[in-house]
Image: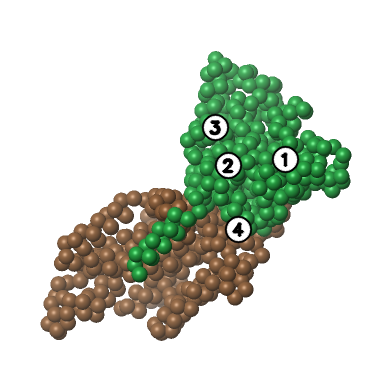
Amino acid sequence: MRLPTIALTLLLFAHAPAHAGKTLDQVRQKAQLACGVSTGVIGFSAADSQGRWNGMDVDICRAIAAAVLNDPGKVKYVPLNAQQRFTALQSGEIDLLSRNTTWTLTRDASLGLHFTAVTYYDGQGFLVPKKLKITGAKQLKNAEICVQSGTTTEKNLGDWFKAQGIKVKPVVFEKFEASIKAFFSGRCQAYTTDASALAFIRSKEAPNPDDYVVLPELISKEPLGPVVRRGDDEWFAIVKWVIFALIEAEEYGITQANLEQMKSSPDPAIQRLLGGAEDSGKLLGLERDWAARAVKAVGNYGEIFQRNVGKDSPLKLPRGANALWNKGGLLYAPPVR
Amino acid sequence: MTKPPPLRDWLRRNLFSDALSSATTVALVAAALWWLPGLVDWLLLQAVFRADAGACQAASHAGACWGVVAEKYRIILFGRYPHEEQWRPLLATALLLVVIVASGRRLLPLRMMTMAWAVAMPAFFILMGGGRFGLQPVGSDQWGGFPLTLLLATLGMLLAFPLAILVALGRFSSLPLLRGLCRGYVELVRGVPLISVLFLASFLFPLLLPPGISIDVLLRVLLGIVLFAAAYLSETIRGGLLAIPAGQHDAAAALGLGRWQAMRWIILPQALRAVVPSMMNSAVSIFKDTSLVTVVSLYELTGSLSLALAGDPEWRSFHLEGYLFIALIYWIGCHAMSRFSRGFEHAAR
C-alpha cells in the first residue's frame, strides 16, 4: 500500500506542470490570464473607484486575453511592487508581467525572463520654470536640480552631466511629495524624472502649469515592455506578436471602429493580419482572427496610446518616440506575414 | 462657614492647586484655543464631503477632502475583491465582528461562545471564498481591505495563543531537548523582523516546493504571522508562569494533583490572568502589524488605500484624508480591544 502511494506521488510530481510550453494551455484551462501590473502608475496601470483596471499596460493584458481567450475581461490583475514583480513571474504566480518595466541587459540575461517587445519608449527629462528661459538641458550649468533619491533617475542625472562636462548640483529628496514641493516652491531650477510622469506633474501638481515647461531632451533610454518567463517559446511568441499586430493595425489604419469594414479590404496585408486570406493564427497556436480580436478589444496601438496617456487622457503626452517608424517615431513591428 | 461649591473645589484641586499647575492649565487651554479653530475649520467647516474631485481641488487643501473617502471607500475597505460581489466580505466581516464583540464583552456563556466561533469562522471562509451555495469562487489572493486585516489579526491571535502556551510550558520542561527547541524557536523568531518572515513565507517558501505544488499565499502569510506572534506571546506567558510563587506548586502537589493537573487547574489560570494586559498588548500589535502583508501583494486596509489612490490622477493628492480615515478604523479596533481587556481584568478579580 505504501510503496504504490509513494510512487504515485512521485509520478504526480513528475507530471506537475513544468513551465515549458504550457503557459497557453494553463491560461486556456483556467480561462484566465494572470497579468502582473503596478500598484498604481497613472496612465499605465491603475485601479479606478470600482476596482476596474485601466492604462496602457492593462490594455496589453486585455489584448492578449482577447487574442487567446476571446474575452478581454478574462484577466486577473495582480498588483506588484518593484521588488515582487520578477519573483512573481518566475514562481508562476502570473503569466505575463505588464508593468512599466525597463528592458535592460541585466534583467533580460540574468533573471530567467524574456522581454517581449517595447510598448512605450520612455526617458528621463527635465521640468523647468518658464521664466528662466531655458530651452535645453545643456543650459542647466550650475543649476540646482531636484531629484528623488535611491532611483535610477539620480544615477542617470549624475552620469549624463558628467559625460557632458557640465556641473550641476543635485538636491536630493527621499520622498516624491517632498521633492515636488521643493521644486514648486523655488528650491531648484529644474526637476528631473521620467518624461511620462513629468508632463503630468506639470499639469496637476504645479500651482500654475503655464509657468513651467518640459524640456525636449531625454537623458536616458527607458524602453518599457511586457515580460514573460523563459522556457516557453510558444507563449513568448504569442505575447510578442499580439503587440506587433496592434502596431501593424495602426500602420494599416485598422481601428476599433472600422474593423468590420477592414475585414473586407482588398489589401492582402490587412487580409493576412485579420485572418481573411491566410490563417496566421495557426502558427501561433491561436484562432484565425486572433489579431482582429485584440484590435476589437482595445483598438490599435495609436488608440491605446491616445486613450491612456495621449491626448484623450489627463496625461496628454505627445506621441514623440512612440509614433510609428514612418511618422518619425521608433515603433517598428516586423510584418505579420 | 460656607462650603465652596463642588465644581470650584474640583477645579482648584485638579487644575489650580499651585502656581505651576495653574500656569500649565492656562498654557494648555491657550494652546487648545489657538490650535482648535484651525483644526475644526480644516476637518469640518471648510471640508468637502461630496465625492467631487473638482470641488476638492478648488478647496486646495484649505479644508479636508472627505470626498476621497466617499469616492473610494469600496476599494479602501475591500481592496481587490470583485466589485459586484462585495456584499459578501461585508456580511462576513459583520458576522465576525459580532462574534468578536460578543466574546470580548462576554455576552454568552463559554459553550455558546465556542459554538458561535465554530459557526462564524467557516461561514466567513465560505462567504469570502465562495465556490459553494452558488457563490462565485474568489481566490484568497483577491481578498483585501478590512476583512483581510480582521481575518489575519483574529486568526493570527487565536492560533498563536495555544502555540504560545505550549512553547511557554515547553521551556519549563524537564527534557533538555524540548527546552532547547522552544528556546531556540523564540530566540530565532524574535531575532528577525516580521517583514522578513513574511517575505520568506511568501517568496522563498514557494521556490522550495516542488514545481506545480503551491500553498495558498494567504495560508503562508498567516502561518508567518502565527509563528511570529506565538514567539512573543510565549514570553509573556512565561513571565506569568514565573510570577506564580513556588508555594502554589507545593500546595497543588499536597492536594494530590499531578504535574499536569496542577498546571491546568492551579498555575496556568493564575499566570494567564496576571498577563492579560500584556497579552492584549500583543493582540493590538498584531492587529496593526497586519499592515505589513502589503509587501507580499496582499492588499489589506493600508495596502488597498495606496491601491485606491496612487494611480488616480484626480484623487492622488488627497492621501492625508485617506490615511486619517483608516487611522480611525485602526483606532476603533485598538480602543475596542483595550476596553475588552479591562473587562477581562475586572472579571478576573
Mark before the other along the chain sequence, 1 or 3:
3
For mark 1, what is the residue? A245
A106 over B1 or under it: above or below: above
Chain letter for mark 3: A
Do circles 1 and 3 both sit on a common chain? Answer: yes
For mark 2, what is the residue? A233
Residues under labels 4 and 3: Cα distance? 33 Å
Residue A63 drawn at (x, y percent): 69, 47
Mark before the other along the chain sequence, 2 or 1:
2
For mark 3, what is the residue? A104
Tag 2: amino acid: Asp
Residues under labels 4 and 2: Cα distance? 19 Å
- Secondary element type, mark 3: loop
What is chain B's hue in the picture?
brown
Mark before the other along the chain sequence, 4 or 2:
4
Q: Residues within 10 Å of mark 2 (few under 14, many from 20)?
A: some
Of the pair B52 and B153, the residue shown nearer to us: B153
Residue A321 drawn at (x, y percent): 70, 29
Instruction: Specify whether residue A141 is in view.
Output: yes
The mark closer to the camera, 2 or 1, is 2
Q: From the image, which quarter does the N terminus of chain B lie in?
A: bottom left
Residue B179 drawn at (x, y percent): 20, 62
The mark closer to the camera, 1 or 3, is 1
Q: Residue at x 64, y 43 (%)?
A: A239
Residues under labels 2 and 1: Cα distance? 18 Å
